[in-house]
Image (spheres, helix red, strand yellow):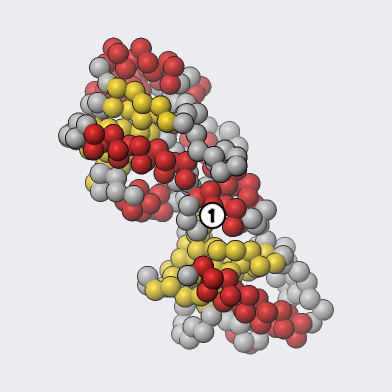
Amino acid sequence: MKTYKDIKDIAINRPVVTMGTFDGLHIGHLHVLNQLKALTRKFNGESVILTFWPHPRKILNSGDIGLLNTIEEKTELFERNGIDHLIILEFTKEMASLTYEAFVKQILVDQIQLQHLIFGYDHRFGKNGEGTFEKLQPLAKTFNFKLHKIDEVRIGHAVSSTRIRHALQYGHVSEANKMLGYPYQLSGKVVKGAQLGRKIGFPTANLNISCEYKLIPGNGVYACKAYLNGKPWPAMMNIGVKPTVNNKQIRNIEVHLIDFEGDLYEKQVKVELIEKIREEIKFPSLNDLVEQLEKDKSRSIDILTAKN
């Protein structure tokens, strides 16, 4: 997959294009990508994703949202799904002020020279979100490209990035993963903590999440897979304030790699969340905490074994 940070002098053979923020790249988005690839094969062209970074809502100040994907995660997912070209345009207030007609003419037609545009059922773009499928139809005739509309995907309900964010905020990881089509992940560098876990037989890696915009799921204990240098480890994660040993209301993300021995400080670790085990609670003593952690470890192993 070729990745571009601007659209100057792009040369693509018969571009078949779809565009959007694709936060989460969930199963609804994957349906669009599959249609994109099918039409690319049908018309002997090349598939093109046009996306934006930062997320438009971060620039337009229309609400502080946690993002489901970093741009690195999103790029990896597009490549994994066999896309030929990924164009990442910097989203600015100047771009937000472009009308949908100007965006089509200046970017899609003049620069990318698209031949086909795949349009999600609820997608809107351009100034004030005025660019809809219906309004694009006359432009498609004017500029001689074909327009294709994709229907929504449902799993008992409509799948959306907003619904996935809501599920994660309440710790409903299994529900979120079902909509995503893959496990939700967090990545970051391991930093030093209080080192209490090591003293009680459960050493943890304190993760400093690399992307400040990344959505952190609700507090609790999760069964997960941790990846160190690409190698998977069964693990469990605590997200929260550690009420048994800490009076400060500062959220931490701590991962215990089961049966791992070694130093993790300053290492990059990726974690895939599989299932929430329990809520974070305050225990009467450290012994009670350790007893519960043993149960959490066994539960995590059972969950991860069943998923393999």
Please name the residue shown 63% across and 75% down the image. 299
Asked if 247 appears above or below 128 in the picture, the reply is below
Comparing 284 with 299, the one in front is 299
Residue 180 visible in the picture? yes
Quadrant housing residue 16: top left
Q: Is residue 30 left or right of residue 292?
A: left
Please name the residue shown 52% across and 74% down the image. 305
Please name the residue shown 23% across and 38% down the image. 41
Q: Is residue 275 left or right of residue 190?
A: right
Instruction: Count residues near mark 1 (Cα–Cα under 10 Å), then give few for <14, some for 14-19, many for 20+.
Output: many
Comparing 107 with 166, the one in front is 166
- Say what secondary structure mark 1 lies in: helix
Quadrant housing residue 134: top left
Q: Type of residue at label 1?
A: Asn
Asked if 260 appears above or below 76 in the picture, the reply is below
Q: Which x, y percent locates residue 275?
A: 60, 63
Q: Which x, y percent locates residue 94?
A: 41, 27
Q: Which x, y percent locates residue 1?
A: 25, 48
Residue 7 visible in the picture? no
Looking at the rendered structure, the number of numbered marks drawn on it comes to 1
Asked if 128 appears above or below 238 in the picture, the reply is above
- Looking at the image, the residue that sits furthest to the right is 284
Please name the residue shown 70% across and 83% down the image. 290
- State the residue position of label 1: 177
Asked if 135 appears above or below 304 in the picture, the reply is above
